[in-house]
Amino acid sequence: MNQTTTYRLYHHPLDPPSRRVRLALAEKGVACDLVLEKPWAFSPDLPTLNPAMQLPVLVIEEGDENNVLSDGQAICEYLDETHAASSLTGKNPMMRAEMRRLVRWFDDKFNAEVSMPLINEKAVKRLRGAGQPDSLVIRSACQNIRGHLDYIAWLTERRNWLAGDVITFADLAAGAHLSVIDYMGDVPWDQHVLAKEWYARLKSRPAFRGILGDHIAGFPPPKHYADLDF
Amino acid sequence: MNQTTTYRLYHHPLDPPSRRVRLALAEKGVACDLVLEKPWAFSPDLPTLNPAMQLPVLVIEEGDENNVLSDGQAICEYLDETHAASSLTGKNPMMRAEMRRLVRWFDDKFNAEVSMPLINEKAVKRLRGAGQPDSLVIRSACQNIRGHLDYIAWLTERRNWLAGDVITFADLAAGAHLSVIDYMGDVPWDQHVLAKEWYARLKSRPAFRGILGDHIAGFPPPKHYADLDF
């Protein structure tokens, strides 16, 4: 008996782990309803769906059963296990360990040094109407991003993709973070040609189309954001 | 041809992810050399082994090949994939997603609210000789731990172990954090009997013996720390 399975993702377009899950769903060809949640003003549903009070949350309805998953990487690995074709975890245990190390690199280190300060200062303050951005914090984050772009260049020169010779969740994690920063116009692509070459390959994948179509009212992206020839 | 594989773990006894990997190695019956690294004064080896500058790091030597793994959960999942007997990831995709969600709960939320402040104030300051502990920070962390012990009780009442009916890395992650706090004498076990019952089951496993034998010079554990009848 084939039951219909429906997927519903609670997300925000400027939340990098939410973007990673959207990319994973698109790579796997899984149709999914999107529910917008503002991280600075969650709906009353959110604490019940995820006591950690974080996006993304994926709700899977199958007949009478309702399963709730949270944590970006937990959701991604679940999607990979249940949709095994064209795996995004890597080809062997060592590559999978490298993929998982790099996912944490971007979700912890890149997030703390680049994404979180830029998103808070440039986007959240504006969307909430909560004061002026702190230019010192922005300058420091824009300096920090350079080391990470160099690291991406160093990795892709040796391996083609970040964790090895095939695309993995490490590329989706890095691409999700960078696409949010790119939405705010803060990635110095022209001074980092190797990282740009890797991002161009990622950006041209059909799975990227959804996030390139993002448009936040009152906070539009720069022109090059959705341009594949940026 | 059987080559000898040797494992070397760079760790610190008060670093919860290091403890989780030691528990995983012991559960899997993998012998491993331990190299002590102080997180507040890393040896010159560490930046080369892990550019994220974090413990733990696992070096696997197999013949001429030398593989370096970092990030606690990446290492644990690698050990599980390469030593498949008595898996610690969970029995199906949904339980594995729950395991991964809970590992992040403890490594992110519990760590920020309980482990990190207590370890920094009570242990690191003392071991470095770097000032007096901040009693306000300690009081707040000791308050925060109660909600987490209630959450453990809530989960284990419904599931036996944290992520389901079998032990997983979620239990090792939680046990690793709590064993560090217990080393400092700050877990109010007597007021949280269900969490205590779960921890007693974990503590009595042979794999726990190694960490119960930890003894840091100048910072000894309380008497009940290694006692199975605490």
Image (cartoon, coloured by chain):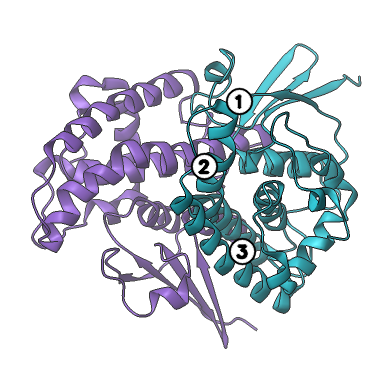
Chain colours: A purple, B cyan
Q: Which residue is mark 1?
A: B38
Per the model, the C-alpha gap separating discs 3 and 1 is 32 Å
Q: Earlier in the sequence, mark 3 or mark 2?
A: 3
Q: Earlier in the sequence, mark 3 or mark 1?
A: 1
Pointers 3 and 2 within a single chain:
yes
Where is residue B165 shown, x and y percent of the image?
Answer: 77, 70
| Vertical comparison of B220 with A120: above or below | above
Dots 3, 1 in contact, CB < 8 A = no
Residue A211 as seen in the image, left or right of residue A57: left
Where is residue A83 shown, x and y percent of the image?
Answer: 57, 59
Q: Which residue is mark 3?
A: B98
Q: Earlier in the sequence, mark 1 or mark 2?
A: 1
- The residue type indicated by label 1 comes to Lys
| Vertical comparison of A57 with B75: above or below | below
Per the model, the C-alpha gap separating discs 1 and 2 is 16 Å
Whether residue A83 appears in this view of the structure is: no
